[in-house]
Amino acid sequence: MVKAISKFVQGPSRALCVLIFLVVSLPLAAQQLGVPQSGVLTISSDRIFTESAFGRRVFDEIEAESAALAAENERIVAELSREEKELTQKREVLSPEEFRPLAEAFDRKVQSHREGQRAKLDALARRSDEARNQFFELAQPMLIDLLRETGASLIIERSNVFLSSDASDVTAIAIRRIDAAIGDGSQLEEGDKP
């Protein structure tokens, strides 16, 4: 009887047993590495950026520049307020013909400062957007590797999914891998920095 079973297992059935073993063990091996096996993965792109070392560095830099810009704006407003008071005092002693050019010059100065500050705010917002775009460009190879390892065919933004298992969410895994690969991005060449 044992010989009959051993002959049966050695032929095509053996190949089938090996195939079944591989099919069952590969997902288990991947799950042991912390990578879920799913045809569709979900990811939170906001979390990937804000919780990554790269995103935290960019946030800190933008926050520092925003604070400096706010302080500069307060200083300019205080300076303009002082000039406006002086101009108001001059109005009482100057004729309308003498006062008008001073008032127009002050208005141009106020407008110029306002436009300058708005341009700086816009540049800061653009820099934030550019940094985010650069981050996802740099992160793409790690996300592609996740697709390959899991055998998934696509990654969907988690906020666009109506219902899914938490097991399909690879956000935390992606953050760890991106941090390991690119860190906070400060090592990038100066021309590539956001």
Image (cartoon, grey):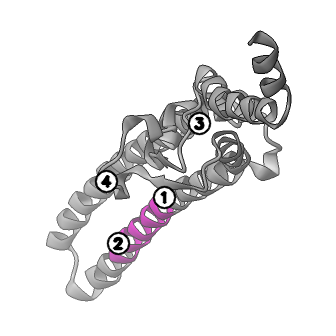
Spatial CA distance of label 1 from label 2 is: 29 Å
Q: Between disc 2 and disc 3, whose residue precedes?
A: 2
Please state which of residues 61 and 178 is positioned toward the viewer in this rendering.
Answer: 178
Labelled pair 1, 3 in contact (Cβ < 8 Å): no
Q: Which amino acid does label 4 sit on?
A: Val
**Alpha-carbon distance for marks 1 and 4?**
22 Å
Q: In x, y percent, where is residue 94?
A: 22, 76
Q: Please state the horizontal and vertical placement of residue 65, each as a whole percent of the image.
A: 50, 43
Which amino acid, by three-letter code, is at mark 2?
Phe
Residue 117 versus residue 172 in the image, above or below: below
Of marks 1 and 4, the one in the foreground: 1
Q: Earlier in the sequence, mark 1 or mark 3?
A: 1
Task: Evaluate if marks 2 and 4 touch, with contact meaning CB atoms under 8 Å apart.
Answer: no
> Residue 124 in the image: x percent, y percent?
51, 55
Mark identifier at residue 106? 2
Q: Nearer the viewer, mark 1 or mark 3?
A: 3
Label whose residue precedes the other's in the sequence (3 or 4): 4
Q: Residue at x 78, y 25 (%)?
A: 9
Examine the structure image and report whether residue 70 is included in the region drawn in magenta: no
Alpha-carbon distance for marks 3 and 4?
Answer: 45 Å
- Residue located beneath label 4 in the image: 77
Residue at label 3? 174
Asked if the residue at tag 4 contacts the one at tag 3, i.e. Cβ–Cβ closer than 8 Å, the answer is no
Secondary element type, mark 1: helix
Q: Is mark 2 on a helix, strand or loop?
A: helix
Q: Nearer the viewer, residue 79 or 177?
A: 177
Earlier-in-chain disc, 1 versus 2:
2
Return the residue at label 1: 125
The residue that appears at 29% across and 77% down in the rendered structure is 103
Dot 4 crowding, Cα within 10 Å, few <14, some 14–19, many 20+? some
Kindly report which numbered mark, 2 or 4, lies closer to the viewer in this rendering. Answer: 4
